[in-house]
Image (cartoon, rainbow, N blue to C red):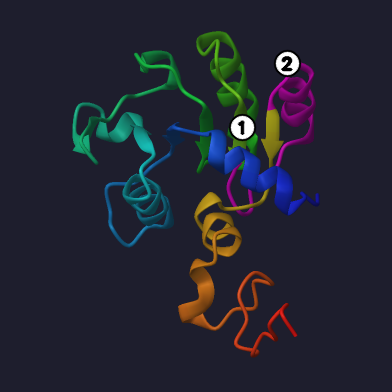
Amino acid sequence: MTYSDKSLKMILNRTRVIAVVGVSMNPVRPSYYVARYLFFKGYRVIPVNPRHFGETLFGEKVVGSLREVNAPVDMVDIFRASNAVPQIVDDALEHFSALETIWMQIGVEHDQARVKAEASGLSVIMNRCPKFEYQRLFGELRKGGFNTGIISSKLQTSHLG
């Protein structure tokens, strides 16, 4: 699926609280460093992983499921296998009244769950990473030498002529 930069940026700008399903406590795991990055960007990150229930990560107690989250959530970020997505989406739709986005990480896709979430009025992103998209859209990839289309090493001519 393709997503416009405008829609991705809108999602990242409106989001304040992210429940990260499948987050790891291991700092070398992608789910950990993505959640950490989002936390340092100012998002409240609620960690969801039954294996680490009750532990603390980024100042939040880890919960075992979305049903145990006691806060409004704007986005559910899914770090689980694609076959786990339908139940996660069902739990999110039942539990969060103000939910706006279901975000499935790189390699995670489920068309039926996408259709169900979109029918409920949610934005759905599949097979993308909010950390990478944030870096790309807000010009943070410059240190890695990536061409974001937002920043350039080319000398800009003045509009004054």
Q: Secondary structure at mark 2?
A: loop
Q: Which residue lies most toward the front here?
A: 160
Amino acid type, label 2: Ser
Question: Residue 67, image x and y in percent?
Answer: 43, 14
Given residues 160 and 20, the one toward you in this image is 160
- The boundaries of the magenta stretch are 104-122
The residue that appears at 80% across and 52% down in the rendered structure is: 2
Please state the horizontal and vertical placement of residue 62, each as a whole percent of the image.
27, 30
**Apparent side of residue 60 relative to residue 23 in the rendered image (left or right):** left
Q: Residues within 10 Å of mark 1 (few under 14, many from 20)?
A: many
Count of labels shown? 2
Looking at the image, which residue is at 36% across and 56% down?
33
Residue designated by label 1: 102
Q: Give yes or no for residue 15 being in the magenta stretch.
A: no
Residue at 46 percent across and 80 percent down: it is 143
- Residue 40, compared with residue 81, is above or below; it is below
Tell me the residue that label 2 is attached to. 120
